[in-house]
Amino acid sequence: MSFETLGLHDVLLKSIRAAGYTEPTPVQAQSIPAALAGGDLMVSAATGSGKTAAFMLPALHRLTMESPIRSIGPRILVLTPTRELALQVTKAAETYGRAMRRVRVVSVVGGMPYPAQIRLLRQHVDVLVATPGRLLDYIDRGRIDFSRLEMLVLDEADRMLDMGFIEDIEQIAAALPEERQTVMFSATFGGQVGRLAEEMLREPTRIELATHRDTHENIEQRLHFADDDAHKGRLLNHLLRGNDVQQAIIFAATKRDTEFLADRLATDGFAAASLHGDMPQAKRNRTLTALRRGEVRVLVATDVAARGIDVPTISHVINYGMPMRAEDYVHRIGRTGRAGRSGVAITLAGPAERGKVRAIERFTTQNIPVHVIEGLEPHFKPQPRDPNRRFGDRRNGRGFGGEGSRGQGGGQRGGEGRQWGDRPQREGAPARRDDNWGNRGTYGDRGGFGERSNDRGNSFARRDGGNTARPAAGGFGDRPRRESQWSNDRRPSGDRPRFEGRGNDRQGRGGGRFDRG
């Protein structure tokens, strides 16, 4: 199949050929004709499969026809979760519309000066690419006219909802014309994404080409266990010095880690730079430009770079810090192996991060092969995994641990289940006292302090009803008790109770209690 068979305008085909594209990807081959038909669309496809062109080419095709409404407002609106992805979409729109006349693409994202963006919005706009928060600011100020909007695109809808943009998206949609085409791209359409699609889309065509369970055949995944951060640093240094590393993205867990790690790598002689959300937008743009030009060989970033970086020369992705969510792992490794190339995704995990590794394997339903570098072997021995185990199978209760899983009828590590309290006696531990750990009665039947084997006295003698007896009078200095204050007659409401005295023998534990009558 070729782009000529998809029904695109000739001017777009000219730009596609100039960009070097010959055949559409599967997501483009199915999404473009459906989008050109004019109906709403739901698409799920893998990272790096050409999703941007799948919605941008039909959007630009609309611009080849004149709008019946005279306005300077945008005809196409694309919402993205991050600034990096917005800039990537903007660049793609400019590339595909290069041969078109008077097509103006504007991006509105956070981190950029308001006056400069306002000047852009005062002029004629055809395609507006924006992040939800900044766009909503301009809608509230009345800076944008959506009277001629024809198409709304939600790119990475699941990520936008994860970032808390659902209310912003609903408010933006309410400000748009009802008669419009809505196209939604998402990794999954369950949960909030599915509910949002039901609210915003009208009888959409659903195209699902890939899920998080798909195998990334062009990406080799490896897992290296590390004893501690120092061991992890030695592994990273060894991996980056490999001859097969062209460019690499290292994902760290926090913003502070990105700067610390980038500085350390620069000291070791690597052309490294950091990228995180707190950096000014101008600096982020310069860093990404240097990465695309090859001036930066190693980029250390947070998950802000897990979506939106499209650099074909990235050969390696290294998870130095584990992702907070298993879904982010899929988007991280998708930064390599792009444009039909092969890539390597390496995860460095410490002893405390084995649970996150298992969560990723459950999410992707795939085992990550464990690799060991000679001379950098880990000292701790992770539990061997059954290569024939199918993720998601529940055996003997919860989880997928088979005979060793917890569950009804199964013990903690297999065998017959035990009842609560049947834990075996630990070797070397003192024998349990029958009066405290033996056959217990119902709640509240435990004896008082004076009835225990350590014989602390009998000051809490039992009375009928389970109440404790009042200790003997006396206290510091054996002050005489005044009958007017310590009588058992109930006092009127509001009279504050007085403390009882404490005995000098210190055998009882009842001193200092309130007598409430």
Image: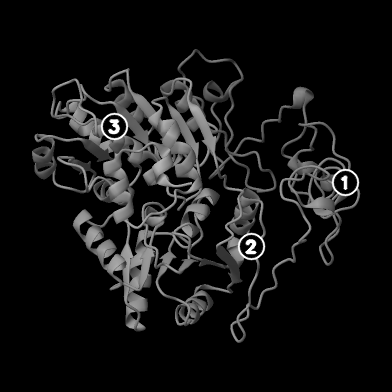
Q: Residue furthest bottom?
A: 375
Cα separation, mark 2 vs mark 3, equals 44 Å
* Disc 3 target residue: 62
Q: On the rendered structure, is 484 left or right of 40?
A: right
User: Can residue 5 be seen?
Assistant: yes
Dot 2 surroundings within 10 Å: few (below 14), some, or many (20 or more)?
Answer: some
Of the numbered discs 2 and 1, the one sitting upstream in the chain is 2
Numbered disc 3: secondary structure: helix
Cα separation, mark 3 vs mark 1, equals 66 Å
Label 2 vs label 3, nearer the camera: 3
Of the numbered discs 2 and 3, the one sitting upstream in the chain is 3
Q: Nearer the viewer, residue 2 or 178?
A: 2
> Residue 281 placed where, x, y %?
22, 54
Q: Residue at x 32, y 50 (%)?
A: 16
Q: Residue at x 28, y 26 (%)?
A: 150
Q: Nearer the viewer, residue 30 or 6?
A: 6
Q: Amino acid at mark 3?
A: Arg
* Disc 2 target residue: 368
> Residue 59 placed where, x, y %?
31, 35
Q: Residue furthest top?
A: 492
**Rendered image: mark on residue 417:** 1
